[in-house]
Amino acid sequence: MRREIAHGSLLREANIPPTSSLLDPIAPVLENRPLGADHFLLTLASPSIAAAARPGQFVMVRLPDRLDPLLARPMSLHEALPPEESLPGRIRILHKVVGKGTSLLASLAPGQSLHLLGPLGRPFEIPSPGGSDRALMVAGGVGIALFPFLVPALLAGGWKPILLFGARSAPDLVTRDAFSRHGVEVLTATEDGSHGTRGRVTALLEERLAGAGMIYACGPDPMLRAVSRLANAAAVPCQLSLESAMGCGFGVCLGCVVPVRRAEGQAYARICVEGPTFMATEVIWE
């Protein structure tokens, strides 16, 4: 089942560009692979969203024919895969069990389906490298979810990506080996010292910041606040992917606003439409 939502009054109110379209397929589950430490990698058949998605975007997911949980959940796009041999276009979602909604996602098996809405949000920008072609990807915990989709775009754009990955302990460093297999340098930090540097990922960022051409970051707010401070002080361009609970995902419910700097002064932006990607110089951390 596939439908395209017309550019009706809700989308005009949400200020979505007129060339955008939201796709809302019912997507069959192809695989739901446990990765350890309550993380799962969910693969869904969704040719329409796989073809339209860009790195940094997300989808709203909801179990069909259920009213509990009532609201859909925002999930970063981990990968968008083209059709190959007998397989259709697919998307992958990396998720961690933290509550009822994600517990239900973890229980899905091939043959079941999810209701998707997307792709949503402002993707990462991939500018041409300037004085430096070194792009630092800073991930905290399950914030790693969106970086596998970004790596091919960075390589195609002439960048040399390096992953700085922080977590509580070694089992939480899921998917890190996949980056190494793609030739990406990976540096890790764990709070308990069980893998890599003992401490927080921002310590790795301080060591590697000089000479960087761009920073991409996703993780908990305290980490993003620290990354913003370091990047802005060093005048290194930095794109943040913010996370928030969302009611709709396309700008109508106003449940995900964040204070930002604008030419006219402080304003509020919706993470689901004006974000989730923001420049570090935009976001006001209170």
Image (cartoon, rainbow, N blue to C red):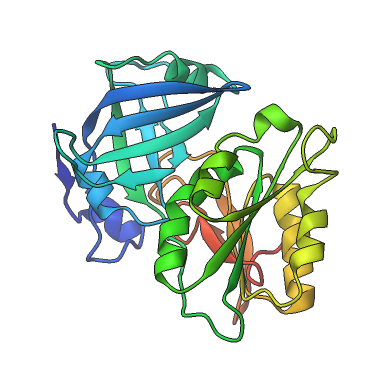
Quadrant in which residue 42 is drawn: top left
Label count reads 0
Position in image of residue 53 (x %, y %): 32, 53
Quadrant in which residue 126 is drawn: bottom left
Position in image of residue 258 (x %, y %): 61, 56
Is there any visible trace of residue 69 in the rendered image? no
For this rendering, which residue is in front, 138 or 70?
138
Position in image of residue 193 (x %, y %): 85, 36
Residue in the picture at 81% in, 64% down: 207
For this rendering, which residue is in front, 10 or 217?
217
Residue in the picture at 20% in, 45% down: 48
- Check the image and report above or below for 144 versus 72: below
Q: Classify residue 125 as left or right of residue 263.
A: left
Residue in the picture at 51% in, 47% down: 181
Q: If the image is split into quadrants, where does the N terminus sit?
A: top left
Position in image of residue 232 (x %, y %): 74, 73
Residue placed furthest toward the bottom: 131
Quadrant in which residue 29 is drawn: top left
Q: If the image is split into quadrants, where does the C terminus sit?
A: bottom right
Residue in the picture at 32% in, 39% down: 91
Is there any visible trace of residue 104 in the rendered image? yes
Q: Classify residue 256 as left or right of residue 189.
A: left
- Check the image and report above or below for 229 versus 248: below
Q: Classify residue 18 as left or right of residue 126.
A: left
